Amino acid sequence: MFFSTTIALLVICVLTIYWYLKGNETNPNKKLPGLEPQWIFGNLRNTGVISGRVVLYEALAELKAKFGDVFSFWLGPYYSIVLSRIDHVQHILADRHTYDIAETTTRNFGVLFPTGLIALRGNEWKRHARFILLMLKRTKVLSYLDTIVTCIDRFIDEKLTRRKWRDSYGFC
């Protein structure tokens, strides 16, 4: 009994060490800058998201200032590429056949966001992309830029800083 338990624990220990060393290839795409991930927590611990020092979007804003518009980020054990410019997003959404998303990604995100762009495929994707890509055109956005900024400011004041909106904008 003792011998079999010892052997089982030794095998589990060796497999855990192998899994850690194999999965600790920090950046699968060596060209992208980013922080070195920690074992289970990825970049959530070393950016202060887990400790509650900063919120995820604040951590991503700090990393954008440090690494630029495109960088890598680890959400726990999951590797992700963060894009900060609208033209990068437009290029990837327009050329989805080039940047095809893996089936596991769509399955995992489909649980949380079943109608999100990342979880859609086929005709449903084409229908959503036709609508979204029109909104990403520069000429379409510029005429509504003041309204967008006003609505975002209102959202930040109401939801993020927990204050009431004092102006009387009724169109948002």
Image (cartoon, rainbow, N blue to C red):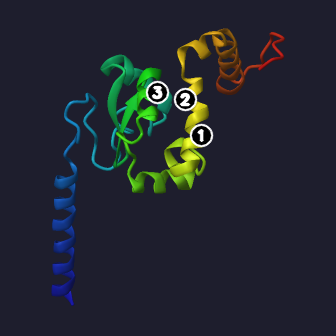
Question: Which sits in the foreground, 123 or 80?
Answer: 123
Q: Is residue 59 visible?
A: no
Residue 90 is marked as 3
> CB atoms at circles 3 and 2 under 8 Å apart?
yes
Question: Which sits in the foreground, 38 or 107?
Answer: 107
Q: Whole-percent x and y of residue 48?
A: 41, 33
Q: Is residue 19 visible?
A: yes
Image-quadrant location for residue 138: top right
Mark 1 residue type: His
Q: Secondary structure at mark 2?
A: helix
Compute the Cα span from label 3 to label 2. Answer: 7 Å
Q: Secondary structure at mark 1?
A: helix
Instruction: Residue at 25%, 28% (x, y): give it.
Output: 33
Look at mark 1 in the image and give the residue it sits on. 128
Instruction: Residue at 18%, 86% (x, y): give it.
Output: 4
> CB atoms at circles 3 and 1 under 8 Å apart?
no
Image-quadrant location for residue 30: top left
Instruction: Residue at 65%, 21% (x, y): give it.
Output: 156
Image-quadrant location for residue 91: top left
Q: Whole-percent x and y of residue 168?
A: 84, 11
Q: Quadrant of the N terminus?
A: bottom left
Name the N-terminal-most of marks 3 and 2. 3
Compute the Cα span from label 1 to label 2. Answer: 9 Å
Name the N-terminal-most of marks 3 and 1. 3
Q: Whole-percent x and y of residue 40?
A: 32, 50
Residue 133 is marked as 2
Name the N-terminal-most of marks 1 and 2. 1
In the image: residue 121, left or right of residue 148 = left
In the image: residue 142, left or right of residue 101 = right
Q: Secondary structure at mark 3?
A: helix
Instruction: Look at the picture and state if 169 lies above or below 134.
Output: above
